[in-house]
Amino acid sequence: MRYAILCVLVVLALPLGVPGSAFADTVVSTFYYPWFGTDSHDGDYAHWAQGGHSPPNDIASNYYPAVGVYSSSSAAVLSEQMVDVAKAGISEIAVSWWGKGSAEDQRLPDVIAAAGQGGIAVAVHLEPYRGRSVASTIADVTYLQGLGVRTFYLYRPFDLPAPDWAPANDRFHAQGLEVFAQTALVGAAATGHFTGVYTYDTLVYRAGLFRRLCRQAHARGLLCAPSVGPGYDAERATGDVRVKPRRNGLTYDSMWRAAIGAGADRITITSFNEWQEGTQIEPALSPTPGSGTARYGSYDGAWGLRGVTAETAYLSRTAEWAAIFRQPTHRLPGARAR
């Protein structure tokens, strides 16, 4: 443990990247969810009330947002979130999208506008909505191109046969689009003619996988975009008893170190604000004893921080790792990936 902590300190003591350098456009992306609602703003507490919870004090998360429960259709919320994204050194948000006409689709233009104000690129995370097919995905991408989206992350692509994706991806590539497949099966992604691979699920796809994933991807001419995250805890929202503990920030550090050391072409973060699964890096409240939010976990203890300063700990650490990733050389001291 002491050796792992020492490695973190050595890495973070490296000089940070210089804004405007040749590596300033290296992509750091985070998965972003525009699906939250509030009773006053939207008529219901969409997603906060998942699993029978009763917001605003009782929500479907093991953590509580520092800003309180919020509506993803609020312009003020979107603006504040994009400020946080930019301060964290994140250059792209991959917006969860559940098909044309969905709540996420209806909010996407406002998300794009808010992101644009902060100089943040917008990609789309194509979710496995009911009836999704290769043909519907072609139509989706064509529609989303009209909103200016040019990068796509396709979740669970191999619900359909890998070869079926090849003609669609050839068409997308000819239009200058990027489509990443969520998989560790590099051969299948190559068969489907995808641009690259990402993993998303940090509970299943751990840091020890990244070196092999990127080596195989590069050997097949694919980009490697492994997904790093702070942990996982979805018990309050879904009853899932599996937990990936945050270990006061060491889990996040370990995944970042492994992704950079593996030669990742871009890094994807799971997630900015998936509160139900406890993967978020968005600021979380440090509850005070006796308050209505005292039942929730917090980031207290992360990198030795406590109270209000701990609430933004993961955004600050993301900025440090993003700067290291953007350096012309980022040789890291060895440490066991977990």
Image: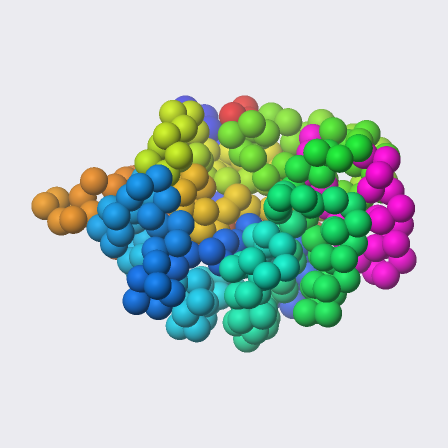
User: In the picture, residue 255 is in which quadrant?
Assistant: top right
Q: Residue furthest front?
A: 131
Vertical arrangement, residue 154 with respect to residue 147, above or below: above
- Which segment is the magenta one? 162-184
Q: Is residue 250 visible?
A: no
Count the numbered circles shown: 0
* Residue at point 89%, 57% (across, down): 174
171 lies left or right of 268: right
- Is-magenta flag for residue 201? no
Vertical arrangement, residue 92 with respect to residue 301, above or below: below
184 lies left or right of 314: right
Image position, residue 173 (x, y; %) = 86, 54
Image position, residue 337 (x, y; %) = 55, 26
Image position, residue 273 (x, y; %) = 45, 51
In this picture the colour scheme is rainbow
User: In the picture, residue 25 is in which quadrant?
Assistant: bottom right
Image position, residue 153 (x, y; %) = 68, 48
213 lies left or right of 194: left
77 lies left or right of 68: right
* Residue at point 43%, 73% (across, down): 75
Q: Residue furthest left?
A: 290
191 or 134, nearer to the observer = 134
38 or 279, nearer to the observer = 38
* Residue at point 71%, 27% (across, down): 212
* Residue at point 53%, 65% (across, down): 107
- Is-magenta flag for residue 182? yes
User: In the picture, residue 191 is in which quadrant?
Assistant: top right
Q: Is residue 273 visible?
A: yes
Q: Quadrant of the N terminus?
A: top left
